[in-house]
Amino acid sequence: MTIAAPAVVVGGGIAGLAAACGLARAGRQVRVLEAHSDFSEVGTAVALPTNGITALRALGATEAEIDELGTAGYGSGFRDQSGRALLRIPAPRPGRDVAAVWGVHRQRLHGLLLAQALAAGVELVPGAGVSSVDPGQRNGRPAQLRWTGADGEQQLSTDLLVGADGMFSSVRSALYPHARAAYSGSSSWRGLLTDASLPAPLVELWGPEAEFGIMRISPTQVYWYGYVRQDEGRHVADEHAAVTDRFASFAPLVHSVIARTRPEDLMRHDVYHLPPALPGYTRERTVLVGDAAHGALPTMGQGAATALEDGATLGSLVDAAGTGPAALAAALAGFDAERRPRCTAIARQALLMARFGADLRGGWPQQVRNALVRLVPGALVVRSGAGLVGWQVP
């Protein structure tokens, strides 16, 4: 059966729902195909810098919804594994500025976007596994995709197809078969802890081939991660014992946070990224967003924020372009011009940050790195980051 739909988003995660909300706000009818049987979200938490909050506002989130989403804090800088300061970031001025970071549970962010999409009339189709994609022709035939759901195999035709299906995107594979996610060489534990005493600022500690971060995400909940160099696909029988042992040389604060985390509130995932940069985020009538387009290492803390930016930008450009194939072509060209240079630069910065931080081996490289970082004024780091977090919707 062939179904006609004005705009189709493949993937119902944060990037997909952000794109759906942006397009719906631009007046488009939108259908979201999600491979899983429901529109739930897995994972623990994300750090949303100011640019992520700006994108949320553009997608329709109110100030009250943002205030309820998580906990406002800031990136306090970096420490060595013993907890001694390497780089201190000054607390934000009154209000929200460059150093501000919101600690947010992934499920709360996803839930906000899901509610926004439903309120905007977006059609949500769970259990829809995409099997083939044809990007169509920019000024000619529509994009085509086949997917299998509860009613069997269906063929869908659309004037705008959005690939938001993550790091291992099937839509990206159809456009760029040789662009594949690669293992970063690192794996990351992530945990949630019930606690009302730890401060809100994001704390990050660097040690030999490891990084540990702690961030409040609600008045009663703290998120932490332990990012380490490790072989891909390594099986661990007792993850709690493994993370305890791996960070035994770190500060007592780290030991306490791990010890007070229940094993059922702990998970670990190998970390992948998308090197090198794609030759384009758009092709014909198809556009890639989120990790499908620019899956970067998490060391810059910009994964969720850039996905939200993608959705807000796509909606804004489609809204401004008007209707018709030529208008859509202009909007997609504008999206690529806006998003690819920025996200490519962020991905490169994330690689450099990993090499200088979490991936750096022990011994003299740590000593030299730590000595150099202690010479950097925190205020200078804040000023240099203004361009990154000062993003505005085009």
Image (cartoon, rainbow, N blue to C red):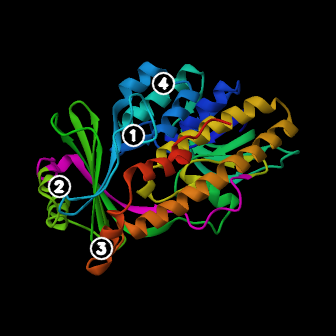
The residues tagged by marks 2 and 3 sit, at their Cα atoms, a distance apart of 19 Å
SS for callout 3: helix
Q: Is residue 228 above or below residue 323?
A: below
Secondary structure, mark 4, is: helix
Please state if 296 lies on the left or on the right of 144 as rendered. Answer: left
Of discs 1 and 3, which sits in the foreground?
A: 3
Label 4: few (<14), some (14–19) or many (≥20) C-alpha neighbours in 10 Å: few
Separation (CA) of disc 3 from disc 4: 46 Å
> Amino acid type of disc 1?
Val
Q: Nearer the viewer, residue 194 or 12?
A: 194
C-alpha separation, residue under disc 4 versus residue under disc 1: 23 Å
Q: Is residue 106 magenta?
A: no
Q: Which residue is mark 4?
A: 115
Specify the label residue 254 is tagged with. 2
Going from the N terminus, do you reach mark 4 or mark 2 first?
A: 4
Badge 2: how crowded within 10 Å, few (<14), some, or many (20+)? many
- Given contact means CB atoms under 8 Å apart, are the residues at marks 3 and 4 in contact? no
Using the image, tell me which numbered label, if any, was put on residue 366: 3
Q: Can you say whether 298 is above or below 120 in the image?
A: below
Q: Please state the horizontal and vertical placement of residue 51, each as a whole percent of the image.
A: 52, 39
Q: Quadrant of residue 99?
A: top left
Amino acid tagged 4:
Ala
